[in-house]
């Protein structure tokens, strides 16, 4: 029932997102435009331009929420998130570097380069977080992710500052946005997101076992290394795809899995199922709020999600549960 209610809310928010913008369109007229492809006029054109933006919000929300769920499950770290662990920063740095050096411009090329950057960032975070006698701990992984993310952000800025041409291409990525949505850009990346979510579904039994500890998971027959590698690979695919499409949008992968866990408990099948809906709800709602606040201009969705996610992150850091990990 909860999942059905969330899907209904997402449907209503999606229609509302199409209706609201610099020129608002009545919902009744939106329905007529959607059911009659032959309709013309300013309102019809506005609606058709907003549809790709809404679809992109759904895709990116699903990708980031799934990546966050996987990372939190495989590390047993409630602070794990594509942006906090440097995956978004790695993808963004690799894409900017490729734009500045070899002039890559096709979105599908961004994805492959972004995946390479995410993989490199993930390896660095894992290596730094594993230093010491106790190996990788939640605190060390979080600190290592913060260090790697800050370093990559500085390197990205160093590349951008002297290159005005690259800045113009990268501008909408800086805070993460949906304004560049085009179906022609989404279609090549859609299979990658689908594969990543498919791998995530296959990892769910293993993530439930990992929640009880590595030793007990091994005793129950779970292949711990295989599960971790699969979850890690899927998270990299999803975060790189989302970053290539919309830029490094922060906190979605952190907040959404926790909201789902609060609503449905600790079983990862339910967490992922609800996260796949809550992620798009957060992105579509944030994008709509950004368009309403400063009409006729837009506040990019990354600013709105950061405004929501930052207080949630602070609450998590101060929680007793985190102190006990």
Image (cartoon, rainbow, N blue to C red):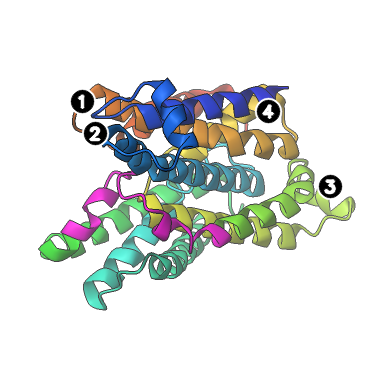
Residue marked by disc 2: 298
The Cα atoms of the two marked residues, 1 and 4, are separated by 32 Å
Label 2 Cα neighbours within 10 Å, binned few <14 / some 14-19 / many ≥20 = some
Q: Which residue is mark 1?
A: 294
Image quarter of residue 177: top left
Disc nearer the start of the sequence (4/3): 4
In the rendered view, tell whether residue 53 sits above or below residue 134. above
Say whether residue 230 is left or right of residue 149: right
In the displayed structure, 111 sits above or below 24; it is: below
Q: Which residue is rendered at x = 30% and y = 44% of the image?
A: 179
N-terminal-most mark, 1 or 4: 4
Q: Eyeballing the image, is 187 above or below 78?
A: below
- The residue that appears at 67% across and 60% down in the rendered structure is 230
Q: Quadrant of the C terminus?
A: top right
Give the CA distance from mark 4 to mark 3: 31 Å
Residue 220 percent coordinates (x, y): 89, 50
Question: How much space separates mark 2 and mark 1, taking CA atoms?
Answer: 6 Å
**Nearest the camera: 158 or 125?**
158
Residue 189 counted in the magenta span? yes
Residue 223 image-quadrant placement? bottom right
Which label lies toward us, 2 or 3? 2
Report the residue marked by disc 4. 3
User: For numbered disc 1, what is the local secondary structure?
Assistant: loop
Bounds of the magenta segment: 168-192
Q: Nearer the viewer, residue 263 or 283?
A: 283
Which numbered marker is on residue 12?
A: none
Q: Are marks 2 and 1 in contact (CB under 8 Å)?
A: yes
Q: Which residue is mark 3?
A: 216
First reached walking from the N terminus: tag 4 or tag 2? 4
Q: Quadrant of residue 100?
A: bottom left
**Residue plotted at (36% across, 21% down):** 26
């Amino acid at each position: 029932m909860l999942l059905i209610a969330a899907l209904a809310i997402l449907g209503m928010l999606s229609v509302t997102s199409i209706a609201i913008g610099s020129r608002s369109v009545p919902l009744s007229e939106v329905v007529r435009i959607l059911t009659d492809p032959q309709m013309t006029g300013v309102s019809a054109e506005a609606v058709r331009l907003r549809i790709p933006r809404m679809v992109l919000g759904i895709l990116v929300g699903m990708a980031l929420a799934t990546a966050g769920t996987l990372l939190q499950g495989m590390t047993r770290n409630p602070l794990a998130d594509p942006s906090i662990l440097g995956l978004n920063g790695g993808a963004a740095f690799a894409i900017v570097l490729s734009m500045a050096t070899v002039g890559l411009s096709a979105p599908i090329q961004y994805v492959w380069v972004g995946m390479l950057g995410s993989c490199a960032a993930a390896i660095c975070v894992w290596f730094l977080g594993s230093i010491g006698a106790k190996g990788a701990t939640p605190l060390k992984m979080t600190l290592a992710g913060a260090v790697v993310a800050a370093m990559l952000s500085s390197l990205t800025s160093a590349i951008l500052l002297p290159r005005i041409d690259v800045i113009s291409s990268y501008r909408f990525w800086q805070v993460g946005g949906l304004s560049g949505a085009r179906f022609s850009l989404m279609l090549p990346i859609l299979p990658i997101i689908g594969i990543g979510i498919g791998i995530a579904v296959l990892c769910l039994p293993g993530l439930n076992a990992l929640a009880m500890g590595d030793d007990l998971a091994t005793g129950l027959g779970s292949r711990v290394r295989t599960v971790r590698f699969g979850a890690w690979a899927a998270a990299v695919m999803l975060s790189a795809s989302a970053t290539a499409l919309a830029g490094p949008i922060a906190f979605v992968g952190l907040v959404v899995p926790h909201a789902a866990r609060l609503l449905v408990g600790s079983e990862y099948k339910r967490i992922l199922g609800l996260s796949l809906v809550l992620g798009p709800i957060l992105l579509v709602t944030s994008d709509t709020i950004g368009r309403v606040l400063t009409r006729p201009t837009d506040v990019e969705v990354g600013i709105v999600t950061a405004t929501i996610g930052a207080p949630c992150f602070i609450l998590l850091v101060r929680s007793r549960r985190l102190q006990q990990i």
